[in-house]
Image (cartoon, rainbow, N blue to C red):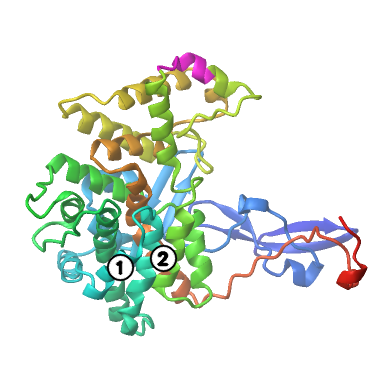
Amino acid sequence: MLEQATLSVGGDTYHLPVVDGAEGDRAINVTKLRETTGFITLDEGYYNTGSCRSAITFIDGDQGILRYRGIPIEQLARKSTFVETCWLLIYGELPTREQLRCWSGLFTKYEMIHEGLYKHFDGFPSTGHPMAILSAMINAMSCYEPSLIEMESPATFQIAAARLISKIRTIAAASYKASIGLPIVYPKPHLDYCSNFLHMMFSIPFRDYEPDPDTVAALQLILILHADHEQNCSSSTVRMVASSGANMFASCAAGVCALWGPLHGGANVAVVEMLQHLHDDNVDLNDYIRQVKDKNSTLRLMGFGHRVYKNYDPRASIMKELADNLLGKMRERDPLLEIAKRLEDVALNDPYFVERRLYPNVDFYSGVILRAMGIPVNMFTVIFAMGRLPGWIANWREVNEGGATLYRPRQIYTGGLARDYVPIDERKSA
């Protein structure tokens, strides 16, 4: 007999089925709760609500574990490439040599964007944020790919997925060039995924940017570490939009908008701004930590703590090592990295942070690394979106292949009671 949970309300008892996940995670299935009891659950922020069953990514926040399709992130960071990781997330298995060759070939084949799309960049003001442009351009791209919107076959889906992952770097780099008033640079088919993006970002008509191998490797690692992260805000948004039957382009464009929020994708920007402030004002770090701990203070230690992880974020460990290696090879030492390392040391030796299990997260070092690579701050979240795109596509596919029902959360109404309409002449002045 299947295990059940018992719910007692107002003297009545109800039995709810218990659902077991593959890694020992457990849930009480409340799908028919309102139908059988008249009650709904209230979980503001969805902190304890399982919105779906997914086979893509597993996180154990207490143990500091992150796996894509069962493979530890540490192994993928050390052995895989971003292009291979895209296949793994979307299709569930590592590709064969032939599959990877064909998959990579599609990225090269579809790296260009339609010439008509380039004209769209002229319509954005120079002050336009690259994330706004990215979202708009992904939707605009679908107008040029009408045959791919329906996804009528596995082959059509694969071409659409490869087009979107390939073209997002072209659009991202073009949005940056347009924002600074420089000519848009076309991709080069002989370059790999990350080298091509850096070329389009930093080359100018009379001088090609020669990607440094260490910088290329750093970008690849950043994209892999951000490729998916379970049911985060943007991935949940993609699934929500996909449940309506929206096409992959529209759903991923919605994901970009969700990621744009400073509480989600903008966290590494906040870290860099904090480190810059500490450097420019020569702030005493011990005093800063003291103010952070003061319950009456509005100061926050950016880049510490995570909604899911109650242990050291495994991505942060990899990022820290990457920062040490990459910046250690540069001629000039980055003062922000030095401050970050000192700040981490101070915080991790303070009982306040240790007892609350507040450890550095992936954002604590990623901004410093991107800054060292020459990526402007307003492009940080765009890089995040490029990395997260395969995860969004994998979630979109899972929703569509699972015969999804339209997502429709309930609410607890807290407004006014029923009342009659009052004609305007009879209304009292405020």
Is residue 4 one of those drawn in magenta? no
Is residue 283 one of those drawn in magenta? yes
Query: Which of 113/234 is in front?
Result: 113
Residue 218's spot in the image, x, y percent? 23, 42
Asked where in the image residue 307 lies, by quadrant, the reply is top right
Rendered view: 303 above or below 99: above
Q: Secondary structure at mark 1?
A: helix
Rendered view: 353 above or below 361: above
Left or right: 157 as drawn, with respect to 351 = left
Q: How many marks?
A: 2
Q: Which residue is mark 1?
A: 164
Query: Which of 217/211 is in front?
Result: 211
Q: Residue at x 31, y 70 (%)?
A: 161
The answer to whether residue 348 of the structure is visible from this angle is: yes
Q: Which residue is mark 2?
A: 252
Category of crowding for the residue at label 2, using alpha-carbon neighbours closer than 10 angstroms: few (below 14), some (14–19), many (at least 20): many
Q: Is tag 2's residue or tag 1's residue first in the polypeptide sequence?
A: 1
Q: Which residues are magenta?
A: 282-289
The answer to whether residue 70 of the structure is visible from this angle is: no
Q: Secondary structure at mark 2?
A: helix
Left or right: 365 as drawn, with respect to 230 = left
The answer to whether the residue labelled 2 contacts the one labelled 1, judged by CB atoms less than 8 Å apart, is: yes
Residue 262 bears which disc, if any? none
Residue 47's spot in the image, x, y percent? 61, 50
Residue 171's spot in the image, x, y percent? 28, 62
